Image: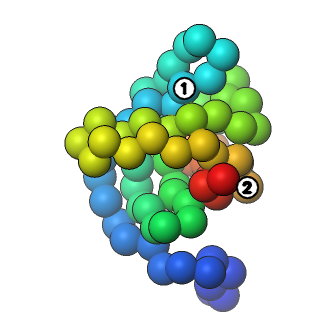
Amino acid sequence: MNEHRGKSRHRVLKTGTIEFGGGAIDCTVRNISETGAALEVVTPLSIPDTFTLYVPSDQLKRQCRIVWRREKRIGVAFE
């Protein structure tokens, strides 16, 4: 498989929150880099194309844009 990312990602298993429009959805951060992340969700269908990702354990809060969606995962680029 070809790697199209600019930065390598590090595998992690951290809880996070997808925040948008006054609401929030829980997620699991599966991998992360300086430029983006892969998130595991119950369903990606109700998640908007842009949102804020919050990872409490790292005190990380980043604006995100979805770059791909799969059955229970989404790939995001940090804005």
Q: What is the quadrant of residue 17 in the picture?
A: top left
- The numbered mark at residue 29 is none
Which residue appears at 43% of the width and 36% of the height? 54
Which residue appears at 46% of the width and 67% of the height? 33
Which of the two discs, 2 and 1, sits closer to the camera? 1
Left or right, residue 14 beside residue 35: left
Q: Position of residue 68 (x, y in %)?
A: 72, 54
Find the distance from the CA under tag 2 to the CA under tag 1.
17 Å
Q: Position of residue 63 (x, y in %)?
A: 60, 43
Left or right, residue 57 beside residue 27: left
Q: Which quadrant of the figure contains the N terminus?
A: bottom right
Name the residue tied to disc 1. Answer: 19
Looking at the rendered structure, the kind of residue marked 2 is Val
The answer to whether residue 79 is above or below residue 49 is below
Which residue appears at 56% of the width and 35% of the height? 52
Q: Position of residue 38 (x, y in %)?
A: 52, 55
Observer-nearest residue: 60 or 71?
A: 60
Q: SS at mark 2?
A: strand
The answer to whether any part of residue 70 appears in the image is no
Q: Position of residue 27 (x, y in %)?
A: 44, 35
Q: SS at mark 1?
A: strand
Q: Earlier in the sequence, mark 2 or mark 1?
A: 1
Name the residue tied to disc 2. Answer: 67
Looking at the rendered structure, the kind of residue marked 1 is Glu
* Label 2 Cα neighbours within 10 Å, binned few <14 / some 14-19 / many ≥20: few
Which residue appears at 48% of the width and 80% of the height? 8
